[in-house]
Image: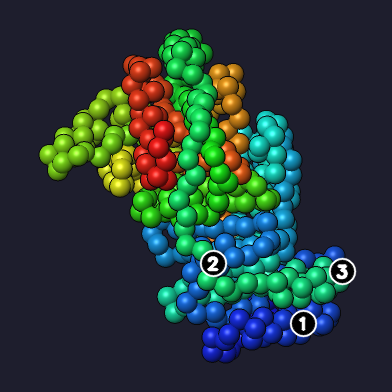
Amino acid sequence: MIDPFVHIETDVLEPEHLRHSLAEAVSHVLERRNGHAATDRHIVQVALPVGDVKAFRWLQAQSTAAKVYWSGRDGTMEVAAMGEADVCCRPAPAGFEALRRHLAPVLASCDPQARYYGGLRFDPSLASSEPWAAFGAYRFVLPRFEVRMQPEGAVLICNLVLPRDHDRKANVLAEIKSLSFSAGLAAQGVPTPVGRADQPARMRWSEMIAWALGAFETNGLDKVVFAREAAFDFDGTLDPLALLENLKAGTPGCFHFCFQPAEGTAFVGASPERLFRRQGRIIDSEAVAGTRPRGASATDDARLLEELLQSDKDQREHEYVRISLREKLGPLSETFHLDAQPSEMKLASGRHLVSRAHSTLREEVTSLDVLQALHPTPAVGGYPTPEALSAIRSQEPFDRGWYAGPVGWIGPDAAEFAVGIRSGLVQPRHLSLFSGAGIVPGSRPNEEWKEIECKISDFIKVLGLRT
């Protein structure tokens, strides 16, 4: 049986020697055909140290179109990945059960250290509009190559899927040969915007809020999160990685991600919100809802915090997320704890109410079970979920795509997903930014418009855009 993790013990080498050492180890693995039936799917990881590699620079230098960047909110995990050793993807529409049938057998045969990176649409049951087509209803990729940043230095991993890659040896070695270790370019500025269009426009937005206020009285809807799209055209080509690097510098305390399934399209974001983190049977999740900006002075900042903590409207909006978290995660858990009261999640340009949950899963519960139970949270959909989804489908004039969907990574016994908010769809000369607001009884169209405009404006400022 082949060891599922092959670590090359060596000092950090020059690029040509790195490629040679990796190719030699991969060839050794691929030449050993024993130990696996033809129908098995077994992942082997070949890893070697690569020293002081900068994740953005390394990823930017690669010629392969399919790329992934992910960094955790606490700064302890940063990954740059490219290529496709294995892909679980299906065009929309496709329900969650299709994802389970596709991905669960793969995870059952994975080495514990293997990770599939990706996400799914906010509403996988709806067909994708053209800009979102490459992402599918869901898309999870085992990259061919990953650079994982570790305290002792970066490690380059080559993922092999056996026995399939036995017959792809020449292609895998060619991929290794094409790896670049050049320094790459520093983050560039964003081209000048030449136009902006909003969906919905302001009048239509007011009509949507009025519709929701009426629905609260008639159809069992308690809360709905309506979103807006601000679409920008540019006079030059956008680089998703450069855009994300600029965004990361201005948004500490967030999950940062870039999923590029093909040349010319990428989903990028800086999300403050964790959907869940799993390690073994331990789950950490959180309810996030209720928003205020940061103040211009310490006094103003303290006033805005107190205003958020005392706001009846924000507390009610937040409470639906707490209720849902207890309803959805509680039954999957042997033990479940939720903060007794919400507290402040403080960000560089804003703040939210947050309640943190901690649980121990029942033994038979999988990460896919948790993912299906928690998405969509009332923080991005509404409450109750069926009524809220129906409202969004009937009222929103654009395709959310992966906006507000789960994004992250998943392995056999560990996973981490963020909620894909504070995000945008990047095309060569086009950027669509998305943001939403929770609508509950008492919501006012102008105030909700201003809340979203503030969120979008913060994003625009961080990216260095001027409109």
Q: Does 36 appear above or below 232?
A: below
Q: Does 117 appear above or below 401?
A: below
Q: Residue 77: horizontal and vertical position, in percent?
A: 46, 64
Query: How far is mark 2 from mark 1, CA to CA?
Result: 28 Å
Residue 38's disc number: 3
Disc 1: which residue: 27
Dot 1 alpha-carbon crowd within 10 angstroms: few under 14, some 14 to 19, many 20 or more? some
Does residue 225 appear anywhere in the picture? yes
Task: Describe residue 83's horizontal placement relative to residue 71 as left or right.
Answer: right
Q: Secondary structure at mark 1?
A: helix
Query: How far is mark 3 from mark 2, CA to CA?
Result: 41 Å
Q: Secondary structure at mark 2?
A: loop
Disc 2: which residue: 184
Residue lying at the far left in this picture: please name it: 299
Q: Residue at x 73, y 70 (%)?
A: 175
- Mark 1 vs mark 3, foreground winner is 1
Q: Please, what is the three-letter code of the amino acid marked with disc 3?
A: Ala
Who comes first in sequence, dot 1 or dot 3?
1
Q: Please, what is the three-letter code of the amino acid marked with disc 1?
A: Ser
- Mark 2 vs mark 1, foreground winner is 2
Q: Secondary structure at mark 3?
A: loop
Q: Residue at x 47, y 47 (%)?
A: 190
Who comes first in sequence, dot 2 or dot 1?
1
Q: Residue at x 47, y 55 (%)?
A: 188
Q: Please, what is the three-letter code of the amino acid marked with disc 2?
A: Gly
Q: Residue at x 30, y 24 (%)?
A: 313
Q: Residue 136: horizontal and vertical position, in percent?
A: 69, 42
